[in-house]
């Protein structure tokens, strides 16, 4: 009888351990895949190329910040003058020059165009900009655009890239929301 009681006790222990193991495994949330993290890219260089419609010499505006936007050094800005009363076809290129060779971040913006939008703010002798590229939902992206100048004088061109803005939006940074990936203003002469 003692042997039978010992066997029953052992069966109960083994059953309890097996049941507990099954319960722990079935309650585990390991089936949930971890959410993919899309880390912000390092953007050291912003290049705006403006080509006059109808021909002429292209103008290049460059902002290069070797230590990144959060570094202590200010970006080095290079600009050329714009022609008065001219419409330009514009393209923007973003680079991470901490990589060798430099990584073209513009390609990622193109791939994730529904999650990005450039905003262009102008003043002075630049009369306006218009988007010429759209995402798959018909919302503006701004990798390509047109820029029009007015009479000769001083001007500014602000370039802001927002990540995960509200789309559609009213074209303003305030309405778009999202986080800022790039924010650069170029001071220009229109001749």
Image: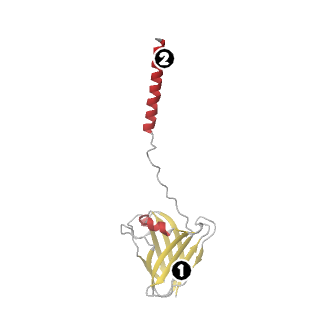
| Badge 1 density bin: few <14, some 14–19, many ≥20, Cα 10 Å | some
Q: Does residue 174 appear left or right of residue 74 in this picture? A: left
- Judge by depth and name the residue closer to the eye, 116 or 174: 116
Q: Is residue 116 visible?
A: no
The residue drawn where x is 45% and y is 49% is 33
Q: Does residue 41 appear left or right of residue 19 in this picture? A: right
- Judge by depth and name the residue closer to the eye, 128 or 114: 114
| Badge 2 density bin: few <14, some 14–19, many ≥20, Cα 10 Å | few
Whether label 1 touches label 2, CB < 8 Å: no
Q: Does residue 16 appear left or right of residue 46 in this picture? A: left
Dividing the picture into quadrants, the one containing residue 65 is bottom right
Whole-percent x and y of residue 73?
63, 69
Q: Is residue 79 visible?
A: yes
Q: Residue furthest left?
A: 137
Dividing the picture into quadrants, the one containing residue 171 is bottom left
- Judge by depth and name the residue closer to the eye, 39 or 182: 39
**Badge 1 or badge 2: first in the primary sequence:** 2
Q: How many marks?
A: 2
Q: CA distance from mark 1 to mark 2?
A: 88 Å
The residue drawn where x is 48% and y is 66% is 108
Whole-percent x and y of residue 113?
43, 66
- Judge by depth and name the residue closer to the eye, 31 or 182: 31
The label number, if any, that marks residue 162 in the structure image: none
Residue on which the image places disc 2: 6
Residue on which the image places disc 1: 60
Task: Tell us which disc is closer to us: 1 or 2.
Answer: 2
Vertical comparison of 170 with 16: above or below? below
Whole-percent x and y of residue 106?
49, 69
Whole-percent x and y of residue 104?
52, 69
Judging from the image, what secondary structure is the residue with disc 1 in? Answer: strand
């Amino acid at each position: 009888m003692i042997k039978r009681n010992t066997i029953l006790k052992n069966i109960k222990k083994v059953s309890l351990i097996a049941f507990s193991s099954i319960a722990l495994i079935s309650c585990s949330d390991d089936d949930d895949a971890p959410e993919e993290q899309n880390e912000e890219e390092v953007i050291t260089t912003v290049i705006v190329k403006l080509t006059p419609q109808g021909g002429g010499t292209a103008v290049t505006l460059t902002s290069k910040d070797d230590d990144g936007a959060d570094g202590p050094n200010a970006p080095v800005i290079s600009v050329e003058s714009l022609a008065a009363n001219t419409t330009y076809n514009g393209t923007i290129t973003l680079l991470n020059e901490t990589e060798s060779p430099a990584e073209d971040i513009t390609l990622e913006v193109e791939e994730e165009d529904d999650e990005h939008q450039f905003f262009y703010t102008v003043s002075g002798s630049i009369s306006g900009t218009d988007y010429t590229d759209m995402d798959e939902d018909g919302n503006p992206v701004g990798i390509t655009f047109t820029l029009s100048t007015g009479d000769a004088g001083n001007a500014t061109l602000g370039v802001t890239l927002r990540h995960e803005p509200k789309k559609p939006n009213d074209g303003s940074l305030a309405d778009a929301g999202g986080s800022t990936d790039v924010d650069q203003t170029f001071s220009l002469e229109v001749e």
